[in-house]
Image: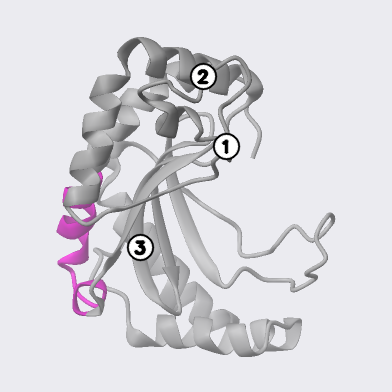
C-alpha cells in the first residue's frame, strides 16, 4: 500500500459538495474523488496505525434510511473505527469540517451498561480522573446521558454524572495543516495513545455483551 502522504483539500471539498447535493447523481459524478482522495488515504493512514492499535474498519458511505425520516442516501463524513469491545474503541472522522479523532463507546446493551455502572460504582475514581484529565487537555467529553439517575441508583451518588452516561466519548479536531500532511499519522497515534486509558477502562465491562451497531 502507498504510504500515507496526507489528505488533499479536495477531500473536504468533496464533502462540502455532498452536503449541498446529497444525491446519487453527485455521488456518481464524484465517485473517483471519493475513492482516490478520501477512502484510499484513510485506508493508508489506518494501515500505519495497525501495529499499535489493531485492524480498523472503514464505515460504508451509504446511510441506513430504513427507519429514518431523512432519506439522504449518503453520509456526509467518512468514519473509521478500531474496536476493543462491542461498539467501543478508537475513532476517526473526516468531513467538510476536517478531521476529528476520538474514542469511547457509542452503544451499549442493557447488560453492558449494567456492568459498566457496577464498575463505576466500585472503582470509578480512576475513570473520573481519566475524564477530568482529558477535558483539561482540550478533549470534548460527550455522549448520550439520562436526565436523572439510572434505575436503582441514587441521584446523590458521588459519580452520578458518569452513571448517567448511556454512551461516552472524547473527541477533538485536528488542524487542517496537519490533516493535509504526512504528520497526521503521528498526530492520530499520539491522540489515540492519550485516549488509551479511557478505552482500556471501559472495554472490560463491555466485552462479551451483545453487539449492536
Residue nearest the viewer, comparing 28 with 173:
173
At 56% from the left and 28% from the top, the residue drawn is 149
Along the horizontal axis of the image, is 58 left or right of 135? Answer: right
Magenta residues, start to end: 177-193
At 53% from the left and 29% from the top, the residue drawn is 86
Residue at disc 3, secondary structure: strand
Work out whether 23 lies above or below 184. Answer: below
Instruction: Report x, y in % for residue 203.
Output: 40, 24
Along the horizontal axis of the image, is 132 left or right of 82? Answer: left
Work out whether 61 lies above or below 134. Answer: below
Q: Residues within 10 Å of mark 1 (few under 14, many from 20)?
A: many
Instruction: Report x, y in % for residue 125.
Output: 26, 21
Along the horizontal axis of the image, is 140 left or right of 107? Answer: left
Residue 154's mark? Answer: 2
Quickly name the residue at label 3. Answer: 100
Instruction: Report x, y in % for residue 28.
Output: 68, 83
Q: Is tag 1's residue or tag 3's residue first in the polypeptide sequence? A: 3
Residue nearest the viewer, comparing 47 with 175:
175
Q: Nearer the viewer, mark 2 or mark 1?
A: 2
Quickly name the residue at label 1. Answer: 107
At 52% from the left and 41% from the top, the residue drawn is 106
At 42% from the left and 81% from the top, the residue drawn is 11
Q: Are marks 3 and 2 in contact (CB under 8 Å)?
A: no
Residue 65 magenta-drawn?
Answer: no
Work out whether 23 lies above or below 40. Answer: below
Residue nearest the viewer, comparing 119 with 189:
119
- Looking at the rendered image, the quarter that the N terminus falls into is bottom left
How many numbered marks appear? Answer: 3
* Image-quadrant location for residue 19: bottom right
Residue at disc 2, secondary structure: loop
Q: Are marks 2 and 1 in contact (CB under 8 Å)?
A: no
Amino acid at each position: 500500500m502507498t504510504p500515507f502522504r496526507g489528505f488533499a483539500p479536495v477531500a473536504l471539498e468533496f464533502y462540502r459538495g455532498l452536503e449541498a447535493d446529497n444525491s446519487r447523481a453527485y455521488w456518481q459524478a464524484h465517485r473517483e474523488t471519493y475513492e482516490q482522495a478520501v477512502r484510499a488515504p484513510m485506508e493508508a493512514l489506518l494501515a500505519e496505525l495497525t501495529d499499535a492499535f489493531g485492524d480498523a474498519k472503514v464505515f460504508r458511505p451509504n446511510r441506513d434510511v430504513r427507519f429514518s425520516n431523512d432519506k439522504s442516501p449518503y453520509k456526509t463524513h467518512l468514519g473509521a473505527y478500531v474496536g476493543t469491545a462491542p461498539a467501543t474503541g478508537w475513532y476517526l472522522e473526516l468531513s467538510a469540517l476536517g478531521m476529528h479523532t476520538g474514542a469511547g463507546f457509542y452503544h451499549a446493551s442493557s447488560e453492558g451498561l449494567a456492568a459498566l455502572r457496577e464498575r463505576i460504582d466500585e472503582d470509578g475514581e480512576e475513570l473520573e480522573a481519566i475524564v477530568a484529565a482529558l477535558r483539561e487537555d482540550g478533549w470534548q467529553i460527550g455522549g448520550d446521558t439520562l436526565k436523572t439517575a439510572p434505575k436503582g441508583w441514587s441521584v446523590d451518588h458521588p459519580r452520578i454524572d458518569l452513571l448517567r452516561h448511556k454512551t461516552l466519548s472524547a473527541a477533538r479536531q485536528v488542524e487542517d495543516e496537519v490533516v493535509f500532511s504526512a504528520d497526521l499519522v503521528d498526530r492520530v497515534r499520539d491522540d489515540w495513545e492519550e485516549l488509551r486509558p479511557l478505552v482500556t477502562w471501559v472495554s472490560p465491562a463491555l466485552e462479551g455483551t451483545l453487539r449492536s451497531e
